[in-house]
Amino acid sequence: MSNIDFEFDKLHEECGVFGIYSHKDEVALNTYWGLYALQHRGQESTGIVVSDGNDMQIRKGMGLVPEVFKDGVGDMIGHIAIGHVRYSTTGASMPYNVQPLKVYFDGGNLALSHNGNLVNAAELRTKLTRDGVVFQTTVDTEVVLSLIARSRKEKIEDRVSEAVNQIKGAFALLIMDDNKLIAVRDSFGFRPLCLGRLDNGWVVSSESCSLDLVGAEFVRDVKPGEMLIIEDSEKEPTSIMWAEEMPAKSAHCIFEYVYFARTDSVIDNQSVYQARINMGRELAKETKDINPDIVISVPDSGTAAAVGYSLEAGIPFLEGLTKNRYIGRTFIQPTQKQRQNAVRLKLNAVKSVVEGKSVVMVDDSIVRGTTSGKIVKLLKDAGAREVHVCISSPPVTDPCYYGIDTSVRKELIASTHTEEEVREYIGADTLHYISLDGLKRSIDKMDPEGMCYACFNAAYPDDAEAVIRQGSKYIFEGKK
Ligand code: SF4
């Protein structure tokens, strides 16, 4: 058996975080369910930490939620828990990098889960290392833990505030000591984080879809630059605006709405499903010159946008591609001949739907361009007369430094090829990416100017590339 990555050509979210404070609910079990609902945000590793006020129990490992917790969580007793699912971007996919991270410091136990990416982690890490700090992982998150532990402030929330004012980049953080659960969102609000209410307790989560599963009621999103301190099952969380300097505008990640988040989540007041329907409608308005017979999606990521296209254009939406949902992560190595057909292991065309038809195929993105061509070929081999590819994001031309796994510009096909070259490469009859204006119109419940679009236009909200270049200098100096 061997590991083969049959994941399609997508950007990958880095992580999902979930936390709970309750004296009545089974906090470990609820965290397990919460992480299950966030599994789409990370499939490489899983972990849960539970505190009973004196001790912290931690269990974590490589694999999906049910794999890591196959023996259950019944023995993890306490009233505070945080959990994490991870897809690695910073730091190798190794057991020592699995979150949550937990340490013992002069204030007792401390644990932390992080979704996002710190753009000045290299610089901070080098400085801390020069001060004699020893790191046990290669993830940027450990820098935050170290900054909190080294703070001279008395209260944990003041320590956290001092630490997060030193870090730059994207972070939705859940931090717990023996008695408190603290949720922190970066001042741009790159990554989502919301608060939910249990009958007797509180929940914080990357996405609202996980609240439904644990019976929590959505209360509100954590604001950019806000810290929530939860130390009582009944009392409202204490809110602190921690950022010494707030940016003029937020920079919520547009890709949460295009692809990352689950369609049943509502993030910063915007339904993810409705945003995707709107993107499909915009695509239909922008491609009036083609006259397809049917609209299909690349399941499941393109489905909501394909429905929107169908509604707007008045053309039927049909399932022209079928996805195999039962593929494990290891396979018997295919032969060279089988390799050419390997895409069919995951996806196959429905001949009776597409044969002889002019088809609009809607997908959310083309990143490296490695699979779109294979899918177009599947449709053509099944007899599709024309395949018009419509993409519900503009061309991805620039890397993301905020917790998404494209950090190398040259790997992005749209950064080195024109739209016509990409069309030719994937073998489509026509190719259309949604315009940036069309995408902005799709986010109809938010201020479109308060979003991050940097992977389409390199307009990094916090000058991330310059900060990272500076960090590289520190790494280099640190190695001398
Ligand atoms: S660069 Fe793109 S993927 Fe990264 S945070 Fe901004 S919009 Fe999201």
Image (tube, helix red, strand yellow):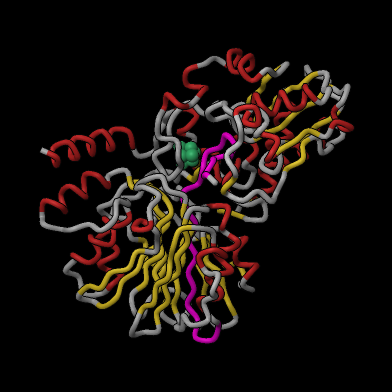
Q: Position of residue 200 (x, y in %)?
A: 55, 83
Query: Which residue is at the front of the view, 447 or 439?
Result: 439
Does the image show residue 452?
no
**316 above or below 116?**
above
- Magenta stretch prevailing secondary structure: loop
Query: Which residue is at the front of the view, 76 or 314?
Result: 76
Q: Position of residue 45 (x, y in %)?
A: 47, 57
- Compared across the picture, whether 258 is left or right of 386 comes to left
Q: Position of residue 194 (x, y in %)?
A: 52, 62
* Magenta highlight on residue 20: yes
- Residue at figure coordinates x 52%, y 38% from the top left: 11
* Magenta highlight on residue 128: no
- Residue at figure coordinates x 63%, y 25% from the top left: 433
Q: Which residues are magenta?
A: 2-25
- Compared across the picture, whether 478 is left or right of 253 comes to left
Q: Position of residue 307 (x, y in %)?
A: 78, 40
**442 above or below 68?**
above
User: Hey, which quadrant is residue 99 in on the image?
Assistant: bottom left
- Residue at figure coordinates x 34%, y 69% from the top left: 111
- Compared across the picture, whether 194 is left or right of 107 comes to right
**3 above or below 152?**
above
- Residue at figure coordinates x 34%, y 79% from the top left: 178
What is the total number of numbered labels drawn onto the structure image?
0
In which quadrant is the C terminus drawn? top left
